[in-house]
Image: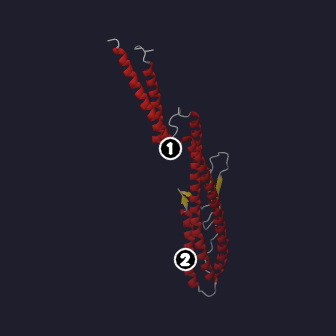
Amino acid sequence: MASINTNMSATLAVSNLNKTTDEMTSVLTAMSSGKSINSASDDAAGLAVYTAMSVDYAAWEQAGDNAEVATAILETADGGLSEIADILERMYELASQASSGSVTDTERAYLDDEYTELMSQIDSIVASTTYFDTSLLDGTYDESFTVSADSAAAAIDVTLSQAFDTTGLAVATGVDTSANATTALGEIEAAIELVSAGRASVGALMSRFDYAAGNIETAQTNLESAMSVYMDADIAQLSADQTELGVKMDSAIQALSVSNENLEKLSRLLS
């Protein structure tokens, strides 16, 4: 029925055009952002899942940072222990030389001067081996590091309870006499064993953190892949949708134009 009061064809054309325009806006938003979900109305359930995954991902990122910090701390400690080990080797050479009857007391005094300086250097290394002003080799370091997004997972404890200064290593005797040099040799041998044990402990912890870091990286990769299922836009599909919606918009506009022309023709019948 032809009517000038209600132009149903135009009304339907406008309705379809508005619907298509809204869909096109959604498609263009997704294409420009690269995200399939740009508002809760796009996919409320998917957004809830993605948000929960994002929290887990952030926790894994922090766990990764914790593992890196722990490794850096242990590397710092091992660097100091390596220097102390080298010094102890030199001190052993000096003590061995001083204990020999082939050197004079005057020569032992020279050897003792270097030996004493090296003892002071050990204490200096211990005092300066820190991480953000926290001493690592004075026997007081005791911290835990969370290396998992699971709050129930056990943290890794890093405890460096051995003091590696001359007091902690029990290196006290000089090499000014043959007898003292012989005593010093025993002290240094025991000190070298303590430093070696300390480095072994530090190395074992570093290895553990390396494996933890590998596990963290795997968990992040898998979680990121799962997150992309919910959030990453399918650009190929969106491009196809854009083309289809463009055709629909053109058709709706054409239909609206024809409807308006038809109404205008009806109005001419009254003139």
Residue 59 visible, this orientation: no
Residue 255 visible, this orientation: yes
**Residue at left offset 67%, top offset 48%:** 153
**Residue at left offset 50%, top offset 37%:** 38
Mark 2 neighbour density, 10 Å: few (under 14) some (14–19) many (20 or more):
some
Residue indicated by mark 2: 114
Picture quadrant of residue 58: top right
Mark 1 neighbour density, 10 Å: few (under 14) some (14–19) many (20 or more):
few
Residue furthest to the left: 271
Residue 74 placed where, x, y %? 59, 60
Residue 125: mark: none
Indicate whether 28 appears above or below 144: above
Closer to the chain start, of discs 2 and 1, is 2
Q: CA distance from mark 2 to mark 1?
A: 75 Å
Q: Amino acid at mark 2?
A: Glu
Residue 140 placed where, x, y %? 62, 57
Quarter of the image for the N terminus: give it. Answer: top left
- Tally of numbered tags: 2
Residue indicated by mark 1: 236
Residue furthest to the bottom: 102
Picture quadrant of residue 205: bottom right
Residue 271 placed where, x, y %? 32, 12
Indicate whether 127 appears above or below 180: above
Residue 250 placed where, x, y %? 42, 32
Which mark's residue is nearer the viewer, 2 or 1?
1
For the residue labelled by badge 1, is the local secondary structure a helix, a strand or a loop?
A: helix
Indicate whether 130 appears above or below 1: below
Residue furthest to the front: 269
Q: Amino acid at mark 1?
A: Ala
Viewer-closest of 105 and 74: 74
**Residue at left offset 46%, top offset 34%:** 245
Viewer-closest of 131 and 41: 41
